[in-house]
Amino acid sequence: MLLLVVTRFDVDTSDDSTSDESDDDFVEFLISNVIYDYHHKFFNKGKVLTSSLSGREFVAEVLNGSETSCFDLFRMKKECFLNFCNELRGKNYLSDSRDVLVEEKVATFLFIIGHNVRHRVASNRFQHSTETISRNFKEVLRAVCRLGKELIKQESIELPERIKNNSKYYPWFKNCIGAIDGTHISAWVPAEKQISCRGRKTTITQNVMCACDFNMMFTYVYSGWEGSAHDSKVFLDAISNPNAGFPWPPRGSFYLVDSGYPCTRGLLPPYRGERYHAQEYRGQGRQPRSPEELFNYRHSSLRMTIERCFGVLKNRFPILKLMPPYKPSRQRLIVIACCTIHNYIRKWNLPDELFNIWEAMDPMELERVNESSGIEGTSSNDNLTRLSDEGAVEMTMSRNRIRDRMWVHHHN
């Protein structure tokens, strides 16, 4: 109902009738415009969501179609998608609502992060209001992060058979349980905070520290640091923050790290000042010429697992390359959710196209692709002081023993 109240003021009775008629005409004109605008806005709206397929029907059509369509749209195969939905439903992390099933909620979430589309685009595709899309997105995000507490962890410290059977790595790295590195994920921050979030390539990023095992599954994710922060600073915060839950390896075991991290208990970095990356050893006459170079060459080759993980993660979820303007807390959760889905696919759906591509990629090609696609790590800090504790001395001595035995075995 439209209620109009028009207040008329007394006017001088000496005004002539022509003036009164002009005032009346003007008031009638205003009232007519108000009525027309109100009716056009609230009673004569055109229908916006006009697709012949509802969101539920669209998801059903995809799941009943080819494997390729499901993978292209939802970034995982049909069987994996259905198992993932059942996992969230079975653990009561996600439930059907009156109008939207779990499968449609998850499909909407994967469609957004897998193609980096805005909620308005998803609204048109799934035939729901943007408010419904936003609510479902946040609901699935929280559910996936809850599942991440169960999936992002160290499943086993046993090396895969392919590493045990490779004399290039075994027995030299038999006590290694994985690799740690930082990567830059796109971020969106207000203008006043952009300086601290600019990475080496001047883009706005957050520095995310991750650990992975040699099955290419993430075992730890620590997100939220500004892009300008160095890897060592993020690491020191992770081990000093009691709420961060950093997973220290068992005594005698260690992670492989690059030269941006300290040489201390549980971390095995390469020798500084020596050649390290794969392209530095490629070509005739460029093979390792010293014990330190041989150690660095094999260390780099094995540590490349974490780079392969980052490659799969960012190519599956383009939202990590260009983050929409979500609030910072949600951006951190999106990173964790993507890593959780990465682990789920790896654990229950091993024949995956992206994993196959990045596992088979040559180390030199991997370094080139990561550099050109913006999968950047922070530069090593030459001024980083080695932690002066017993653990640092112990790890330095252990690294030297591995180096010497590896060199002798190489020449024999």
Image: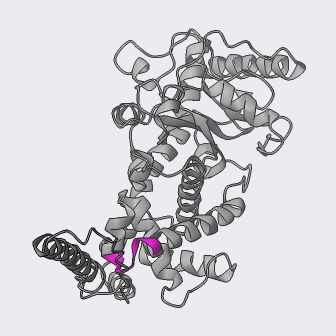
**x, y percent for residue 191:** 46, 33
Residue at 34%, 77% (x, y): give it: 6
Q: Nearer the viewer, residue 168 or 24?
A: 24
Q: Is residue 65 magenta?
A: no
Task: Residue at 57%, 21% (x, y): give it.
Answer: 296
Q: How many marks?
A: 0
Quarter holding residue 42: bottom left
Name the residue: 18% across, 68% down: 15
| Front residue of this view, candidates 109 and 47 | 47
Image position of 199 with respect to 124: above or below: above
Q: The N terminus appears in which quarter of the rendering?
A: bottom left
Q: Is residue 42 above or below residue 231?
A: below
Question: Residue 74: x percent and y percent?
Answer: 40, 69
User: Where are the magenta residues, as a range?
Assistant: 125-131
Closest to the observer: 15 or 189? 15
Examine the image and state in which quarter residue 110 appears.
Answer: bottom left
Q: Residue at x 66, y 82 (%)?
A: 90
Vertical arrangement, residue 143 with respect to residue 288, above or below: below
Visible in this render: residue 62?
Answer: yes
Residue 408: percent from left, percent from top: 65, 17
Image quarter where the C terminus lies is top right
Q: Position of residue 47 (x, y in %)?
A: 25, 83
Residue 75 at least partly seen: no
Q: Is residue 173 left or right of residue 353?
A: right
Give the image's coloring scheme: one colour
The furthest residue to the right: 390
Relative vertical location of residue 384 with respect to residue 226 in this rendering, above or below = above
The answer to whether 97 appears left or right of 323 in the picture is: right
